[in-house]
Amino acid sequence: MTRHRGNSRVAWCVAALLSLSAGVARAEPSADQAAAAEALFRQGRDLVAQGKLVEACPKFAASQRLDPGYGTQWNLADCLERLGRTASAWAAFREAADMASRAGQADREAKAARRAADLEKRLERLAIAVSAPADGLVVRRNGAVLDAGAWSAPLPVDPGTHRIEATAPGKKPFSVEAQTAGPGKVVTVAVPPLEDDPAAAGATAAAPSQPGGPSAPAPGAPLRPVAGGDGDDGASTRRTLAFVAGGVGVAGVVTGSIFGLIASARWGRAQDDHCRTATLCDDQGVALVDDAKSAATLSNIGFVVGGVGLAAGVALFVTSLGDAEPAAARIVVTPAVGTTGGGLGIQGRF
């Protein structure tokens, strides 16, 4: 039983490693994505120049999803403000300020923060009050689920009409449309206790049990353990997880190496062609240095993920060789981080 629970925990860890490794791999846009993002950005700027804001804003949003950048985020926020979507523009300017802050660009951060502060004075808010929540109650605003923690909170919304819906199992649905009241004003929508739906309750009671489906044990029936937690099946599972974790480790190391090379190349180009000293650079040099730092961070993350994956793979493989787990197995992973990339040291004792 103990080994069975251990396998479950290891499987969870391997799944987390896979997710983290995939996230690192997706952090840098491909050449096709970067090209598409640039094309969409230029289309958005052309549409703004033509006064076609309704068409321009989605172009900036699509470009930002493909290849996030401060300039695209700023243009998206400005487009949304011109379109009158004050809450969306406020959130977009706040995100632009955060991006600039993370990049150490104080002037850009202050510029975006000022625009957000000006918009905040004009925000219109909507609160959804739920007095008697039914079991399984789901509240939606304009089709999006509103977390229970946000009920009754006066949240910023774009000016105009908003549809509020409330549903729960066995209850009649409730819906209403609410109109914002102007800058600085809060509109509260009350969701009443939902009425019982006799038709839904009758359908649930009349539903026959599915043949062959799971059933609860009879009262007093002995409970039997599920097979497969120990013995050869447990060792086989550990070996399988060992190969999966090892694959994650290799992917992490490869990812770290790729981003390390990118960081080194951009740093070298900046210092050779665009910087008089390590800190005195022209605009293109500053951009290259920022790119090098971002790539170095991703390189370090890749090496850490790779080290943990390889260490987990070795440990799982060793413990799968016999029933008794080694008493003194020890693996030490030492990531080496730097401005232009990272490395990895692994030591083990069994």
Image: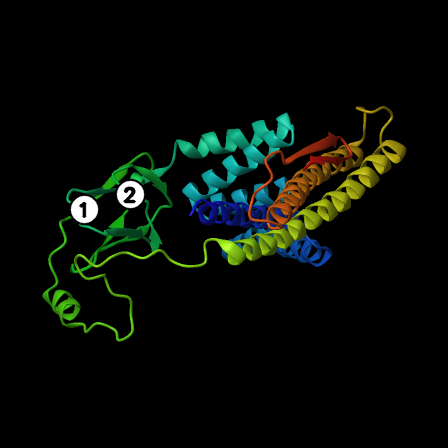
Q: Nearer the viewer, residue 191 or 262?
A: 262
Q: In the rendered image, which residue does mark 1 sit on?
A: 133
Q: Which residue shows up at 54% across the image and 50% down it?
A: 15
Query: Where is residue 242 shown, x and y percent of the image?
Result: 62, 51
Q: Is residue 96 left or right of residue 343?
A: left
Direction from residue 118 to residue 316 in the image, left or right = right
Do the residues under discs 1 and 2 have CB atoms within 8 angstroms? yes
Residue 108 seen in render: yes
Q: Tell me the number on the disc at residue 148.
A: 2
Q: Is residue 282 above or below residue 30?
A: above
Residue extending furthest toward the right? 272
Residue at 81%, 39% in the rendered image: 266
Where is 254 relative to 200, above or below? above
User: As shown in the figure, which amino acid type bears the numbered disc 2?
Assistant: Ala
Q: Between residues 297 and 43, which one lies in front from this camera angle?
A: 297
Nearer to the camera, 246 or 18 = 246
